[in-house]
Image (cartoon, coloured by chain):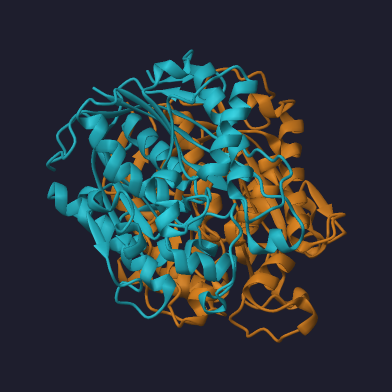
Chain colours: A cyan, B orange
């Protein structure tokens, strides 16, 4: 039997395997510190399309197709797709992965969607509802800027607390024990547990400081995960947040210290890893649904596969911001999902 | 063991119970044919708030609180919340149900979200991941018009194919066999199976004719449900779509006839039931995330509870439309989820 753990976590009886991943990014991400690790760097920010939204859809399709190619699988072999993006009404997903003809569950958890999709994917496989499912998320710098801020042509100045939306899409295949007729690119990565995320609102209204908006949610989910599973930070080789950036990281570490948890040694943030802040002028770091997805796909998973990291708590973070809520003076609540990845 | 059925369906080994529902609607819905059945009709379209988005959030909170009150439960007793709405970045949900402090999975399936949320809720309970979960969706006429069309003050004319977005929110509690310390308002309704929905795009570009955009997706999911479970239309007392309206209904019946399925006798559409098209000037019918939710909560479930209907296929339908994709000349693909509700 699958086990409910504590207040909001699940421990899988038969922990699903994460058998393959793919990452597709833009040119700027390719120039960053992780550039060599991504599966595909596309120099054309429009991905051959005529709008930013279609570009993001195309990038998402490429990531999905690539993870299928890697395993020699076809869309018909994937029972369900859990996917999302940042755009209103999941525009990129509706016209991207939607075209794959895989039964789809559309998700929105802001930049935490990679965690939400992996959690639900693991839950579906762990329950025996599917042999193999796909989790897929994307973000695109230009479609996000257009939607949340200003058209790029305005060249508006970004404050130092701001993060840079990652152009990237990551796809993941999650499968059960049984042979699914696909080649397993990873054989030693299991999703052993998940922790659902609550909306946490500290009343912060600065949409240019997402790290501060999301850090309290990351703190909440990390604490809950440790409480639910009876673990300490040292029980994880790494605790990896999605896109808190430099400012959010400091806040998270402070908040967790107040709760009695010291995670300085274990903490890593995908938004900090993906760009070089000096050379790339990205201020507080990278962000977006694609940020944690492509860092997980390219950098984190191979380390778990090789056993360099035995147990990782992956915590994508999201800021519940819309231009409408922002312009109406609402705060920016955060949410974060916890996914426990183990070498096994 | 839970059973994968056919290509995209699940049959639950221990079918979860739908133990309670609530419906909160606006004045116009209260004046419609189902008006007397809704739990609460709020005469104030702003629900005491100063923006349409906050109004929708407030309505959603009221629906959630009401379903908890009916069963004597508290938010702490609900393990997960599956919820969504139509607004960009799920604005209504982020600031509505998010405030309940229940670990949340944010969903977007356009107007099909009620089906998506019930499917995932049943999957979570059916797998033993939770004792009790909540599914919750909402839409508001004014927040939807403002986002997808024009400010209400423009008083733009609506074509006859258009539907009227329902102001309403429906909340549902889904629970396992075990006592969850709440009073069960319904004791005889079980979710015995679900059918995942695929994105189906017939290339229709008329955003004022949602019924035509969604009917092919409804057809796809209904056919797949019958194929996966080895059923005929007669095996259902009712096959109930979400918000196809009069035009979409005709198309659906035609499309299914072409596939060899005749559902004239069983078919019902929540969008057709909720308004009186003559007296209420709603043209093709009602629509929105709240439409199928409040009709299910108030009208359909009591009939199943009493055994008047033994087996119902509930198929909320969604049109993947954003103002951005529409203005960029994209088509409007559809999606539909199937939820099998049985008297037991």
Image location of residue B47, percent across then percent down: 84, 55
Image location of residue B168, percent across then percent down: 71, 56
Is A262 displayed left or right of A343 in the figure? right
Q: Nearer the viewer, residue B137 or B300?
A: B137
Q: Nearer the viewer, residue A233 or A174?
A: A233
What count of labels does the image hold? 0
- The structure residue drawn at horizontal position 53% and vertical position 63%, both measured from the top left corner, is A89
- The structure residue drawn at horizontal position 47% and vertical position 57%, both measured from the top left corner, is A282
Is A15 displayed left or right of A140 in the figure? left
Task: Note whether residue B263 is visible.
Answer: no
Image location of residue B123, percent across then percent down: 44, 36
Above or below residue B64? Residue B26 is below
Most extreme residue toward the top is: A230
Task: Note whether residue B137 is visible.
Answer: yes
- The structure residue drawn at horizontal position 65% and vertical position 22%, both measured from the top left corner, is A258
Image quadrant where one finds the C terminus of chain A? top left
Above or below residue B87? Residue B206 is below
Image location of residue A127, percent across then percent down: 35, 30
- The structure residue drawn at horizontal position 56% and vertical position 23%, both measured from the top left corner, is A223
Is B184 displayed left or right of B324 in the figure? right
Locate residue A3: give its quadrant.
top left
Q: Nearer the viewer, residue B36 or A205?
A: A205
Q: Nearer the viewer, residue A104 or A144?
A: A144
Image quadrant where one finds the N terminus of chain A? top left
């Amino acid at each position: 039997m699958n086990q409910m753990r504590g207040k909001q976590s699940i421990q899988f009886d038969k922990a699903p395997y994460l058998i393959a991943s793919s990452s597709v990014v833009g040119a700027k991400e390719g120039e960053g510190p992780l550039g060599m690790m991504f599966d595909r760097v596309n120099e054309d920010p429009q991905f051959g399309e005529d709008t930013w939204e279609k570009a993001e859809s195309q990038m998402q399709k490429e990531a999905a197709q690539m993870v299928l190619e890697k395993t020699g699988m076809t869309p018909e072999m994937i029972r369900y797709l859990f996917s999302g993006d940042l755009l209103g009404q999941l525009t990129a997903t509706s016209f991207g992965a939607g075209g794959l003809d895989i039964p789809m569950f559309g998700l929105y958890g802001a930049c935490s969607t990679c965690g939400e999709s992996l959690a639900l994917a693991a839950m579906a496989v762990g329950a025996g509802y599917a042999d193999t499912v796909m989790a897929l998320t994307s973000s695109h710098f230009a479609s996000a800027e257009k939607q949340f801020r200003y058209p790029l042509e305005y060249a508006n100045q970004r404050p130092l607390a701001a993060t840079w939306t990652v152009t990237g899409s990551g796809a993941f295949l999650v499968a059960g024990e049984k042979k699914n007729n696909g080649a397993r690119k990873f054989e030693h990565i299991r999703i052993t547990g998940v922790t659902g995320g609550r909306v946490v609102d500290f009343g912060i209204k600065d949409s240019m400081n997402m790290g501060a908006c999301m850090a309290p949610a990351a703190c909440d989910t990390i604490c809950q995960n440790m409480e639910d599973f009876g673990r300490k930070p040292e029980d994880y080789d790494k605790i990896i947040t999605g896109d808190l950036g430099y400012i959010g990281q400091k806040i998270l570490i402070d908040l967790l210290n107040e709760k009695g948890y010291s995670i300085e040694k274990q903490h890593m943030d995908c938004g900090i890893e993906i760009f070089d802040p000096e050379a790339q002028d990205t201020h507080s770091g990278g962000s977006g649904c694609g940020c944690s997805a492509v860092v997980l796909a390219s950098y984190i998973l191979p380390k778990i596969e090789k056993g360099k990291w035995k147990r990782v708590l992956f915590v994508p973070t999201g800021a519940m911001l819309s231009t409408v809520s922002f312009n109406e003076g609402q705060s920016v609540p955060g949410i974060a999902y916890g996914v426990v990845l183990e070498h096994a």
